[in-house]
Image: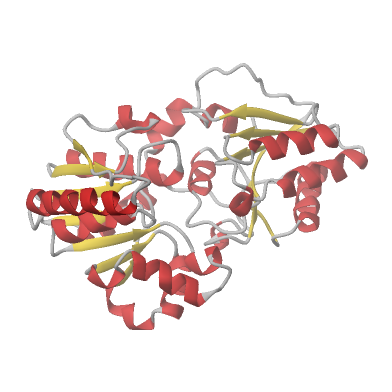
Amino acid sequence: MKKILFTARDLNLGGIEKSLVILTNYLVEKGNDVTLVLENKQGILLSELNSKIKLKEYKPVKNKVKIVQKAFNFFKRIKAIIEYKNKYDVSISFATYSIPGSFIAIIASKSNILWGHADYLSLFNKDENKMRKFFEDIHMDKFSKIVFVSKTAKDNFLRVFPEKKNCTYYCNNLIDYEKIKSMAEEKIAIEKDDMKFTFLNVGRHDETQKKLTRIIEASRMLKEDGFKFRVIFVGSGESTHLYKELVKKYNLNDYIIFEGSKENPYPYFKISDCVILSSDYEGYPVVFLESFILNKPLITTKVSDYEDVENKRGLVCEKNTDDLYNAMKIFLNNGYILKEKFDCEHYNNEIKDTINELIL
């Protein structure tokens, strides 16, 4: 049995958070002692954590008076050092963007891991200086291992930091495929419509990354072509208002349906004909795995590891509206037959082997 500590920002609904819950639950079930330290002990996924996981909070103080803020946080850091310093066998900063989480993971164990979920070179628009600054701020050099959930993210990281080759690894996310299949059977108000092709997008509404305007613009073009279809958006975020205004402007209310965030999005996969991803960048998209498990073809832009979709589980397009429109049009005209079945058990066994090497 090992004492393992994870850090993250919160457990609100998201791909990183889902992956964290599955991984920590798996490690507890293997007989390990797991502690999870969150910046904010909140989120809809808290209820899915194994009850044996110890849940703690480390939240820096915010104050308008900077000297007061610095003083309070100095004493919080001292207290944290006393509480966590080398008390664990392994410590993992699972949300790379969390500076407080990085601090706790660094002090909690000499065997500490930085877990990356994004292709940071794409995230920073290929600006290597910004990428270097990001990793300096989270004190990358103090971690003994760096893990990425996609091959593309790992390769691009090593382009910028080739000196990290011997301590950088690839490990995709575990999936609870039986649970996903079971949850997909839940009844929802929207039903499958055999007379209307259904596209599905699941995720956070953040135009900077997700670029859902591409789907809306492509839908406008398809409507003008006379196609009958619908697009279901499951998710919400800071850009939801923008998307709703655009749908109203183009008179697409009968074509695009906003369902908001759902704790269980999987019944929407069941009633859809195609899952669509329009992002500029991703880590390894969790929606890829969810689509594979539920046997739904995909349309995706060229985000990390898009090769897992290309020519076998859907269509891949460039990061622009016209290419997305053409891919959607192909689906509407011809449909799509999956060319390769996804072996969930084999996939998970490979990930478990890697986790055992990295953590256990």
Please state if 347 lies on the left or on the right of 297 as rendered: left
Please state if 132 lies on the left or on the right of 331 as rendered: left
**Front in this rendered view, residue 299 or 303:** 303
Please state if 220 lies on the left or on the right of 269 as rendered: right
Percent across and percent down for residue 70 are 26, 54
- Residue under the point 84% across and 36% down: 249
Look at the image and tell me in which quarter the C terminus lies. bottom left
Give residue 270's quadrant in the image.
top right
Residue 53 to residue 3: above or below: above
- Residue under the point 39% across and 33% down: 178
**Front in this rendered view, residue 54 or 64:** 64
**Front in this rendered view, residue 268 or 81:** 81
Give residue 169's quadrant in the image.
bottom left
Badge count: 0
Percent across and percent down for residue 62 are 33, 45
Please state if 274 lies on the left or on the right of 151 as rendered: right
Residue 125 to residue 176: above or below: below
Whether residue 360 is visible, yes or no, is: no
Percent across and percent down for residue 216 are 76, 42
**According to the image, what is the colour scheme of the structure?**
secondary structure
Percent across and percent down for residue 118 are 46, 59
Looking at this rendering, what residue extends furthest in the right direction? 225
Whether residue 98 is visible, yes or no, is: yes
